[in-house]
Image (cartoon, coloured by chain):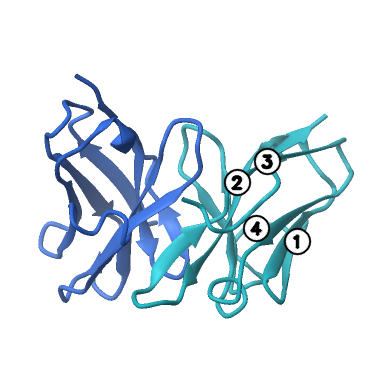
Chain colours: A blue, B cyan
């Protein structure tokens, strides 16, 4: 059974860089798209971006200038980097398998941006 | 940010039916597959429906979905207290670049 677990720094100051990692267990990262999705407090889901093992990436246009997603097949990890964070980047960050549909999700990790 | 519109909340008694609408446009719902997710806050969201109307593995047939034009619907029949959760539709939007999009979310309350 494939499981995803996100981890990374939970508290950031404005202008810092958010770095999160999603570890995949019980399955392969090869042959799938992997996505990052976030949920601001009290709001709905927002797609951040996606990547695959061959270097393919696609990003939400509203975040494109600040975001990067990478897939490490040897470590079975998916990484997210978001630069120059502000309070608006506060929320729960999920990694998920898929692109046109997300069939497996992690539990999510809370990231708070505050001075 | 959400381009797909859902009712904020719906309520019904156990055993009854709720229908959650997801309203989009030609560039998203109208031309692409819709999926539906169930989310209990603090947990991992779960894929219920994909490709407009296909149930994900292990999802009971109390959950069904359809799509017509630029709108999609998720029906939950025989409502149970354990169905009280947030529900989101999702698809992608065609344009200069493809963007994955979600609905605004619907909180289903079981009275």
Mark 4–mark 2 Cα distance, whole angstroms, equals 20 Å
Q: Secondary structure under badge 2?
A: loop
Secondary structure beneath label 4 = loop
Kindly identify which chain the residue marked by label 3 belongs to.
B
Q: CA distance from mark 3 to mark 4?
A: 23 Å
Horizontal and vertical percent position of residue B90:
54, 61
- Sequence-wise, the earlier of marks 2 and 3 is 3
Residue carrying label 4 = B59
* Residue under pointer 2: B105
Q: Which disc is residue B53 wearing? A: none
Tell me which label, 3 or 4, sits earlier in the chain: 3
Labels 1 and 4 positioned on one and the same chain: yes
Disc 2 to disc 1: CB gap under 8 Å: no
Q: Secondary structure at mark 3?
A: loop
Q: Are marks 2 and 3 on the same chain?
A: yes
Q: Are marks 4 and 2 on the same chain?
A: yes
Quick check: marks 2 and 3 in contact, CB under 8 Å?
Answer: yes
User: Which residue appears at 28% of the width and 76% of the height?
Assistant: A31
Would you say B77 lies left or right of A43 here?
right
């Amino acid at each position: 059974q494939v499981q995803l677990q996100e981890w990374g720094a939970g508290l950031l100051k404005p202008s810092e860089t958010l770095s999160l990692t999603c570890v995949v267990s019980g399955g392969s990262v090869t042959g799938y798209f992997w996505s990052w999705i976030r949920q601001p407090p009290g709001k709905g889901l927002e797609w951040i971006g996606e990547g695959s093992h061959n270097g393919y990436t696609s990003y939400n246009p509203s975040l494109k200038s600040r975001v990067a997603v990478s897939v490490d097949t040897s470590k079975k990890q998916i990484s997210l980097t978001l630069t120059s964070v502000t309070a608006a980047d506060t929320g729960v960050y999920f990694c998920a398998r898929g692109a046109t549909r997300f069939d497996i999700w992690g539990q999510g990790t809370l990231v708070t941006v505050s001075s | 940010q959400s381009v797909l519109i859902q009712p904020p909340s719906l309520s019904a008694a156990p055993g009854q039916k709720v229908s959650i609408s997801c309203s989009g446009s030609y560039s998203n719902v109208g031309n692409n597959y819709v999926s539906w997710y169930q989310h209990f806050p603090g947990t991992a969201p779960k894929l219920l429906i994909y490709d407009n109307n296909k149930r994900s593995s292990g999802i009971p047939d109390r959950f069904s979905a359809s799509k017509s034009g630029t709108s999609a619907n998720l029906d939950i029949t025989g409502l149970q207290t354990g169905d009280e959760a947030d529900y989101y539709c999702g698809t992608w939007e065609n344009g200069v670049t493809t963007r994955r999009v979600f609905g605004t979310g619907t909180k289903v309350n079981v009275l």
